[in-house]
């Protein structure tokens, strides 16, 4: 399991009590400029010191109650040095400052 998926799986278990089969996690990566971001999810104050553009690694998991969990990690390149992470449930922000170390 890659480090991004491990971080997502561990976060859902620790923060929300959800056990995730990592094989059911779908992921993709996309490069975005700051002006393309939803500032309700990534407020300007969080972005000030980050590079532009940013690479976002996004993972999606649908739980047994059909709730969609989206986990988004920001990095400046493909080095996997994570800069910021958020978690959404059914399109609503639930965790803005996700710890960036997988335990």
Image (tube, grey):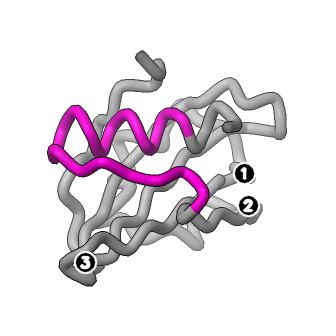
**In this figure, which residue is indicated by the disc labeled 1?**
55
Q: Is residue 9 left or right of residue 98?
A: right
Which quadrant is the N terminus positioned in?
top right
Query: What SS does tag 3 mark?
Result: loop
User: Disc 2 versus disc 3: distance between alpha carbons?
Assistant: 22 Å
Residue positioned 60% across, 58% down in the render: 23
**Residue 7 image offset from top left, x and y in percent:** 48, 34
> Residue at 65% across / 53% down in the picture?
57
Q: Which residues are magenta?
A: 6-23
Kindly report the distance in space between the C-alpha atoms of the residues bearing marks 1 and 2.
Answer: 7 Å
What residue is disc 3 on? 67
Q: Are marks 1 and 2 in contact (CB under 8 Å)?
A: yes
Looking at the rendered structure, which numbered label has been put on residue 29?
A: 2
| Image depth: mark 2 or mark 3 in front | 3
In the image, residue 42 sits, relative to residue 6, either above or below, namely: below
The kind of secondary structure element at disc 1 is: strand
Percent across and percent down for residue 101 are: 46, 19
Q: Secondary structure at mark 2?
A: strand
User: Is 53 placed above or below 17 here?
Assistant: below
């Amino acid at each position: 399991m890659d480090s991004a998926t491990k971080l997502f799986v561990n976060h859902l278990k620790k923060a929300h009590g959800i056990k995730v089969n990592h094989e059911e996690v779908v992921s993709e990566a996309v490069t975005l400029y700051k002006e393309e971001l939803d500032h309700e999810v990534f407020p300007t104050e969080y972005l000030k010191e980050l590079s532009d553009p940013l690479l976002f690694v996004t993972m999606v998991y649908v739980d047994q109650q059909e709730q969609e969990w989206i986990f988004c990690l920001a990095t400046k390149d493909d080095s996997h040095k994570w800069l910021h992470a958020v978690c959404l449930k059914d399109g609503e922000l639930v965790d803005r400052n996700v710890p960036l170390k997988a335990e």
